[in-house]
Amino acid sequence: MDRETAVRSQNLADAVPFYGEGAPIPESRDLSAKDDTSGFNAVVILLARSWPYISPQVLGRWWMPGVGVEERVAELIRGRGYSFVYMPLLVTILAVLFPYCSIVPITFEYPYNFLFSLILLAVIFSWPLPNLTGRIQTVSLVLVVLSLILANMIAIVLVEGLATKIYTGTLSLVCLLGWFVQIRIVPTGVKFRVRVGSHLIYYYGLEALKGLGVLFIGLVTAEIINQSVLQNEPLMPGLSALLGYPSMSAEALAVLSEAQRMELRWAPIKIELAWFLLLWPLDIFLLYYIIWVFQRINHDLRLALVDQWHKLSLRHHSDHRVGDSIWRIQSDSETVTHVLKVLGELAVMLVNVVVTAALITILSPLLGFIILFTLVPTFLVARWAMPRFRTRSLVQRIANADLTSMVQESFRSIKLTKAYEAGERSQANFEDDSMIAFNAEYRNERLGFRVSVITESYSAVLIFGGVCLMALWSSTSQPTFARELIALAGLSFVVWNLSAYQWTRERYEGAVGLIVEIMRIWGWAQDVAMGLRRVFDILDMEPEVRDKHGAIPFKKFEQEIRFKDVAFAYSPERPVLDGVNLVAAPGTITAIVGPTGSGKSTLVNLLLRLFDPDRGVISIDGKDIRDFSVDSLRKHIAIALQENVLFGMTIRDNIRYAVPDADEAKINEAVRIACLQETLETMPDGLDTMLGDRGGRLSVGQRQRISIARAIIRDTPILLLDEPTASLDADTEHRVLENLREWAENLDSSKRAIFLITHRISTIRRADEILFLESGKVVESGDHQKLMSIESGLYRSFVRAESGDITLD
Ligand SMILES: Nc1ncnc2c1ncn2[C@@H]1O[C@H](COP(=O)(O)OP(=O)(O)OP(=O)(O)O)[C@@H](O)[C@H]1O
Ligand SMILES: [Mg+2]
């Protein structure tokens, strides 16, 4: 970097302010909260709409013996004759068996009252699952899942001993088994299928296991330190065996000796180390795993987008900048990976807030009310902030898309930029757009900070007030509120004392904090939803040209191509074609002639169904081309475009772009017809010469002949040549045309029809039929002789003008 550039880039960096706004966002590219069109419901719907892309990673696919893994995504619950009738039976038996064998106690004291009620609920509602459908099934599914989750939470947190945990765990696993392994009874026996690839279930299952492990380690460590190391109590028998200290079991002795106590100090460290060694690989794996799963979700959505892009009409593409498409595919679609995180965190927090708020209300309704009151300012702030989050997210996304377009366009036009020495101007434009993108992002972040300053302030005040109240009650030993309920909920605070104060304060702060946190996450959800909105906006577009219901495949072209009274406009106020009539037969060359902008390219594009006409009919052998499937029609038409598009691959690959498996003979034939041999001979690697970016290493005439060869190799009955010979010298053009004429004559059983758009008189006069187009109308048609004989004909004056009035016949 020389000094000048260094100073310059330093100045550029200064253009980004440390605080405050940078270059303002121009009004035309800005949105205010008033422009917001997606309310709460719209955001929820947008988030929910990502389900089709997430669901394959949840539902997985079926594996069947002899069939392997199916392509299609598995059903949500059951289907196609497969079910899990065995599951409710198994669950019911196990639910009764454990208490019957006294593995879990038969008691209805807290917390078993809750536990058994939940298990009863799960057992009852497991029955409709494999047997009924519709709403009952959905409701049952939700009830079974929720009650099992809660039962497990109670068993893990509130019940002592391992047996009950195994009890609820086993019941849950059996329910899951029904989801994973399904059977179908057929006359010959029982068939089964297994759900595989439910990656999100695996992932969250492993995460839950890890969470349990952490909890378990915490409990064990606390037990060892509090009871044994500090109070000399021997270890519980199970634990002593597990840790490898059988001699310190409560069964072996009543009090630990000093030496044993000292030895036991090391136990927690050993446990932590063992856990770390086990957890570390698991953690790395989980990190990798979830990225892999999310990337697959993102990949599916990206593919859907690109697929849609191929289907959308050219009208759409010419109205949208490429950078916008790139940004939507690359960046907006990425937000789909955040949907689960957002919804998951919101769900956990909501449950948490409701449960803690309920418990605190039992101790003091006033505190419960303050928690509830937190909702008021939060709601007000959310009402103000959410529309702004949405519009700012959109502005930011649009600004970035514009920046991408700018980069893409300026690199495309690098030759022009250099030729006109417009480098500095182009750089300055880029700087402006970059500043706007920065500012859009900055404003979005700043909104987030503002909101958090406000919410932190009022939540701090509410927390302080609540804590003061609790401190006051505790210092005067005030009675707590609902004593009967307190016992039922497993609490033991009858009056406010130090431990009641500590317990409640922790949860109270948590509840108020969570309400604010929920709002923060919901703010994030707005950004996610806006990304999705830009994605679904595209996915929701109806492609203009698509197969109609019952479209038939196009098979053969035998008699004629006919345009009847065809009208078309890109935008309603400016008709491009108006009442075009033409007929073209196989084995003929039809030349389309006319001043620039008269609609020649548009006419051949209509035949390819890049657009459909607004009025009139284009038919092939008497059938409207809209009756054919688009793919099959295009398979039978080849086109050499006016703007010849080449790719940075070898000449050979460029030629066989549309027919990747074309053999050498075909390629050579195409090369011969397009008169490419001489060019190839001058190249060191012949057909294997690599072309630069977009064919940049070739002359325009060479590029045109490659596009012609590419059209020929498709070997279709209809060939459209849109001025591909304009840059060839007259001699080469004639040779190409003679070759084409010969080629048109001998297709296996029938002949080919060629449409040729050109300005060159010597070429035009050899055509069988000439159409003279002006302002979207065919004003004259016939062969050269006929058109020249029209005294004040437009064609005649066109020819005069083109040939400089020299040769006329
Ligand atoms: N994608 C588009 N969107 C809107 N208008 C378009 C589009 N493409 C072409 N037009 C307009 O339609 C008219 C006909 O364009 P067309 O490309 O068919 O002309 P042409 O006869 O092929 O001209 P040329 O000889 O210069 O190639 C022109 O006025 C042009 O401005
Ligand atoms: Mg054109």
Image (tube, grey):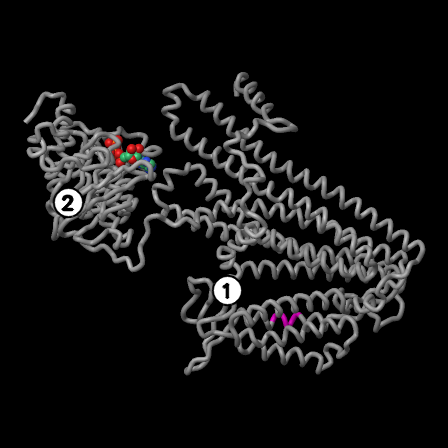
- The residue under label 2 is which amino acid type? Val
Magenta stretch: give its range. 169-173
Label 1: which residue? Answer: 196
Q: Say if the magenta span includes residue 475.
A: no
- Whichever of callouts 1 and 2 sits on the residue coming sooner in the sequence is 1
Answer with the quarter of the image where residue 495 lies. Answer: bottom right
Q: Closer to us: mark 1 or mark 2?
A: 2
**For the residue carrying disc 2, how many other residues have a C-alpha within 10 Å: few (<14), some (14-19), or many (20+)?**
some
- The residue under label 1 is which amino acid type? Val
Q: Secondary structure at mark 2?
A: strand
In the depicted structure, whether residue 584 falls above or below residue 555: above
Picture residue at 10% right of the left edge, 39% below the top: 768
Q: Is residue 61 left or right of residue 679?
A: right
Label 2: which residue? Answer: 583
- Residue 296 horizontal/vertical position (percent): 49, 52
In the depicted structure, whether residue 119 falls above or below residue 713: below
- Residue 256 horizontal/vertical position (percent): 88, 65
